[in-house]
Image (tube, rainbow, N blue to C red):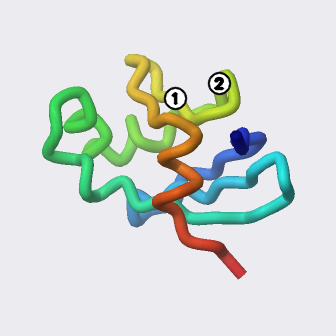
Amino acid sequence: MRKVISVTPQDDCSPFLVFDNGEHRLFDVRPYLDKGIFTQLRDPLYFKQVRVAFGTVQWPNEQDFAPETLYAESKVYT
């Protein structure tokens, strides 16, 4: 299982992720913004509060994504 070691929020709701294997990837959060607890991520100021926690990303109200999801659904950034 790959772990996130760094996250940088982007303005387009696609956090820039660095994984423990050195890969740089972008994860598009937009498909989740109408679902339950993820609706808070629509607020740009809140979205930018993302942090690495336990090998994945997390926001203050504990919204998170499984690291497997982040890796599988993200695109390699070159």
Residue under the image location 52 percent in, 57 percent down: 72
- Residues under numbered marks 2 and 1 in contact, where contact means CB atoms less than 8 Å apart: yes
**Residue at 31% of width from left, 40% of height from top?**
41
Q: What amino acid is found at the position of numbered circle 1 in the picture?
A: Gln
Q: Residue furthest bottom?
A: 78
Q: Residue at label 2?
A: 53
Q: Earlier in the sequence, mark 2 or mark 1?
A: 2
Q: Give the x, y percent position of residue 26.
A: 56, 64
Q: Mark 1 Cα within 10 Å, few/some/many (few <14, many 20+)? A: some
The amino acid type of the residue labelled 2 equals Ala
Residue depicted at 64% across the width and 64% down the height: 25
Q: Residue furthest front?
A: 1
Of residue 41 and residue 54, the one placed in the foreground of this image is 54
How far is the residue under mark 2 from the one under mark 1? Answer: 6 Å
Residue 58, which numbered label? 1
Q: Secondary structure at mark 2?
A: strand
Q: Nearer the viewer, residue 41 or 20?
A: 20
Dot 1: element: strand
